[in-house]
Image (cartoon, rainbow, N blue to C red):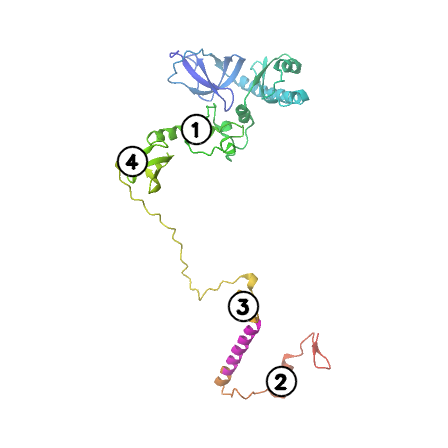
Amino acid sequence: MSEQKLIRVQFKRIGKTYYFSAPEDMELQVGEFVIVNTARGKQIAKVASIEQHPPDHDQEVQGVERKATPRDLILRDMIKEKEAEALEKARDFLNKPEYKGVKAIDAEYSFDSTRLTLFLTYEDLPNFNMRNFIREAAPMYTDTRLEIRQVGPRDMAKEVSGLGACGIEKRCCSRFLTEFSSISIRMAKSQNVSLTPTEITGICGRLRCCLAYEHDMYEEARKLLPKRKKSIQTPLGEGKVIQVLPLSDSVIVSIPEVGSREITRTELETGVMEEKKPVLAAIQSEDTSDDHDVEMVRFDQIGRPPKGEESRPGSTSKTRQRRDRSMQTRTETFEEQSGQDPKIAQPKSSKDSASSRKKRGRRPGKRVSHDGSKSK
């Protein structure tokens, strides 16, 4: 088997890869299409990789018949259209009440269109009879042998795709996962992940595939650290491990008369506590502007008294008294500078008043009534 030229092919864009043997004189490149023989007839597949060092196994490997021609690629596009029509017919047929809970996920024709495989998902349906379904649905597909395959919730989620539970725009199974690995609750426990069902299950209702991504790294880190509930000797005294932190390469130890302390693996090996670096506080940028030159004013407080004065009773009268005193002080200062006596008022003469009014002219829109009051 090791002397054969093995290649790995995919029948779907992100699907499981299968081994096939190719003739030695057939030159193939990754990305090319080939015609292969399968248990469901001839199929067209895409070359995913060429094994330089074929694995040693005793399983029977089917052979590659030939490379796909441009005509085969055109026929492949036509088969895809037929598969879409067959899937639509199956979904309309499953709308019957007796098939409630059964869903058609995908349809697949053989390359010569002699076989049609419908992929259905159904769980907890004891009354569903597959033979009766094939007998009733077969007349819809003439000159074709109908086969049914049941798929699980993971395969259904992979086919439907959509938003992932973590918020990623496309689920991992629909982007790059070609095979589903076995996921156990132990993987979540070793990574200290919350065991809340909504936190560790995906859209398919099964444990998330991403729990297996870092599981091996956590297990390797845990081998170098003491296990939980184990009594160990630390630089601060003997204590019991209450939590293991693989990512920080440390453990939290409960030490009598000291409390819970985080101790690294280096401290456990050397027996000396490392000096903890102080956490630098964030330095706030200081405002170098002068407070006397800048005044912060809110638009909703323009023309209003200060907030403290607004709430005190009599604040309006006090503000008015201060304003009157400041006006009186400015008047006295002006009169002293001009040489006038501040105690003696200097009324304007009637002639000067009349001349000033004549220069200004009569103000429009106002009249003087007989009683001396102004009105518009």
| Neighbours of disc 2 within 10 Å: few (<14), some (14-19), many (20+) | few
Question: Picture coordinates of residue 92 (x, y %)?
Answer: 66, 22
- How far apart, in angstroms, are the residues tagged by discs 1 and 4? 29 Å
Q: Which residue is labeled 2 in the image?
A: 353
In magenta stretch: residue 185: no
| Residue 356 seen in the figure | yes
Task: Give the number of the mark in front: 2 or 4.
Answer: 4
- How far apart, in angstroms, are the residues tagged by discs 2 and 4? 104 Å
Which quarter of the rendered picture does the C terminus lie within? bottom right
Q: Residue at x 45, y 14 (%)?
A: 20
Task: Give the number of the mark in front: 1 or 4.
Answer: 4
Question: Picture coordinates of residue 178 (x, y %)?
Answer: 48, 24
Q: What residue type is labelled 4?
A: Gln
Q: Which residue is labeled 4 in the image?
A: 233
Image vertical order of residue 3 relative to residue 105, above or below: above
Q: Which residue is labeled 3 in the image?
A: 309
Q: Which residue is labeled 1 in the image?
A: 187
Residue farthest toward the front in the current orientation of the protein: 257
- Sequence-first disc among 3 and 1: 1
Q: Do the residues labelled 3 and 1 touch (CB within 8 Å)?
A: no
Look at the numbered disc 1 and give the secondary structure of its residue: helix
Question: What stretch of residues is rendered in magenta?
Answer: 316-332
Look at the numbered disc 4 and give the secondary structure of its residue: strand
